[in-house]
Image (cartoon, rainbow, N blue to C red):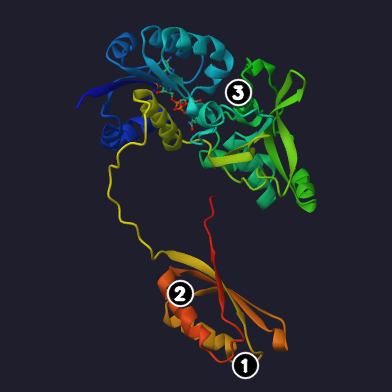
């Protein structure tokens, strides 16, 4: 099979994760594209030679960060007719127009999904899925570090300094967190998002930004008392005829707002357009393996834009009986022994009860419980048996409970 040579510039958090992922997924990519991706060389400060790597590559992946020499290498790669994939938000938010013009001039692709909101496919959605939509507004939580800090302050009542120290200990914040906490990192991402959403040049120096360094535990308490969430929000919106605003600042959000429930290091972007109403995309905003996944997705897109759905490469079994947690609602006679009888039948089928609430009295007595995940077939076997108990006033009702927590 023909090899597709990928030159890798940078071998840090994301670059090293990209090398690992590329090796793991090479067979699957080969099956999808008909080309086998492999590294042609790696450039760091201490190893590799850019000219040699460029000469031996079909595509260049830039994961060095910074403006120079990243800008020069990306321009040279495109001038040599190579596609480029980059996750460098600083570079794209400050030199995007020059780089995109060079890509058009040389007929190559410049892909950058990993530069904004990590693995969340916001770039693809703006450039492809929503290419026909007239976008009115985008709100985003596009910096995981600050969202983690604010989430910790809100849920544990800790100070900004304590939450920042925790974020650093967990690797969510850099030793020098300035770009994150001042809002500058989010501003770079909003510049790129706004450029794509509104097809107008937007660079980082045009984005007004304010960080979270001055937020206090009192502010968080106030937000919670009012039923509001406090988040660092990036906004890109049309504000008048021929005008847009692009900004980043802390903001209170109604609990119902889709971004209010984004906690921890997660990112989310809400896109509003009259035709589509509103779409929210959310997921991990950063991290080496997560960003590497976005980068490899871009590499595959650049290798062969598939004309149609690729042939299947796996024959996986589709199972019907899975484990689920359940909410179980029973209208019961108000008498002793009811709970024990239900618990016994559930227990015999391997169901363990997470919580129980008894509600109402007499003819209105109800028993509501949540059971821990178990095979659905076993749970429904227990329900069938419970339904035969003489104290039931109607058939029990069961609703599955999705328990995943993404924190
Ligand atoms: N980390 C994340 O979660 C994340 C998420 C989204 C996007 N990104 C973006 O991805 C890019 C890489 O981030 P990272 O976290 O992987 O950075 P990193 O850990 O600091 O790694 C940077 C790599 O680039 C190399 N490098 C830097 N300057 C160089 C130069 N002048 N010549 C040759 N090599 C050079 C470094 O070489 P040495 O090993 O010799 O120092 C290192 O291998 C950045 O643009 C970042 O904004 C990162």
Sequence-wise first label, 1 or 3: 3
Real-space Cα separation, disc 3 to disc 2, in angstroms: 50 Å
Closer to the camera in the image, 311 or 403? 311
The part of the image, by quadrant, that contains residue 160 is top right
The part of the image, by quadrant, that contains residue 232 is top right
Sequence-wise first label, 3 or 2: 3
* Residue located beneath label 2 in the image: 379
Q: Locate residue 379, reporting x and y percent.
A: 46, 74
Ligand 1 is in which quadrant of the figure? top left
The part of the image, by quadrant, that contains residue 401 is bottom right
Q: Locate residue 139, reporting x and y percent.
A: 67, 34
* Residue located beneath label 1 in the image: 336
Q: Residue 188 carries which label?
A: 3
Real-space Cα separation, disc 1 to disc 3, in angstroms: 64 Å
Element at badge 1?
loop
Q: Would you place residue 39 above or below residue 400 in this image?
A: above
Foreground mark, 3 or 2, reads: 2
Give the residue displayed 56% in from the left and 41% down from the top: 282
Real-space Cα separation, disc 2 to disc 1, in angstroms: 24 Å
Closer to the camera in the image, 85 or 123? 123
Q: In this view, does 313 lie to the left or right of 109?
A: left
Q: Which mark is residue 38?
A: none
Q: Would you place residue 360 above or below residue 94 in this image?
A: below
Number of numbered markers: 3
Q: Locate residue 314, reporting x and y percent.
A: 28, 46
């Amino acid at each position: 099979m023909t090899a597709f040579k990928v030159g890798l510039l940078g071998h840090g958090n994301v670059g090293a994760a990209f090398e690992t992922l590329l090796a793991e997924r090479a067979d699957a990519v080969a099956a999808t594209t008909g080309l086998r991706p492999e590294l042609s060389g790696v450039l760091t400060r201490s190893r590799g030679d850019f000219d040699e790597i460029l000469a031996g590559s079909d595509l260049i992946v830039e994961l060095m960060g910074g403006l120079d020499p990243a800008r020069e290498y990306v321009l040279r790669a495109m001038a040599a007719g190579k596609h480029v994939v980059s996750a460098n938000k600083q570079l794209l938010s400050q030199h995007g127009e020059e780089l995109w013009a060079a890509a058009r001039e040389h007929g190559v692709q410049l892909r950058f999904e990993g530069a904004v909101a990590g693995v969340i496919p916001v770039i693809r959605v703006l450039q492809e899925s929503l290419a026909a939509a007239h976008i009115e507004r985008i709100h985003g939580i596009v910096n995981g570090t600050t969202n983690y800090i604010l989430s910790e302050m809100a849920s544990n009542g800790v100070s900004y300094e304590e939450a920042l120290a925790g974020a650093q200990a967990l690797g969510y914040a850099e030793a020098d967190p300035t770009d994150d906490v001042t809002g500058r990192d989010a501003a770079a991402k909003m510049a790129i998002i706004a450029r794509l959403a509104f097809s107008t040049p937007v660079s980082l120096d045009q984005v007004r930004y304010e960080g979270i360094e001055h937020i206090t535990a009192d502010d968080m308490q106030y937000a919670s008392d009012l039923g509001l969430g406090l988040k660092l929000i990036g906004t890109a919106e049309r504000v008048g005829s021929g005008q847009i605003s692009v900004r980043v600042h802390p903001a209170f959000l109604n609990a119902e707002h889709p971004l209010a429930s984004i906690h921890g290091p997660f990112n989310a972007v809400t896109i509003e357009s009259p035709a589509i109403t509103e779409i929210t995309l959310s997921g991990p905003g950063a991290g080496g393996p997560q960003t590497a996944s976005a980068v490899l997705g871009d590499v595959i897109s650049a290798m062969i834009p598939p004309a149609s759905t690729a042939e299947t490469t796996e024959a996986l079994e589709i199972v019907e009986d899975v484990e689920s947690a359940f909410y179980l609602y029973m209208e019961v006679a108000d008498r002793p022994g009811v709970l024990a009888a239900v618990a016994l039948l559930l227990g015999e089928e391997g169901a363990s009860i997470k919580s129980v609430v008894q509600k109402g009295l007499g003819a209105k007595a109800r028993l509501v419980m949540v059971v821990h995940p178990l095979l659905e077939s076993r749970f429904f076997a227990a329900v069938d048996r419970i339904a035969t108990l003489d104290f039931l006033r109607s058939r029990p009702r069961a609703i599955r409970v999705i328990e995943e927590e993404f924190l």
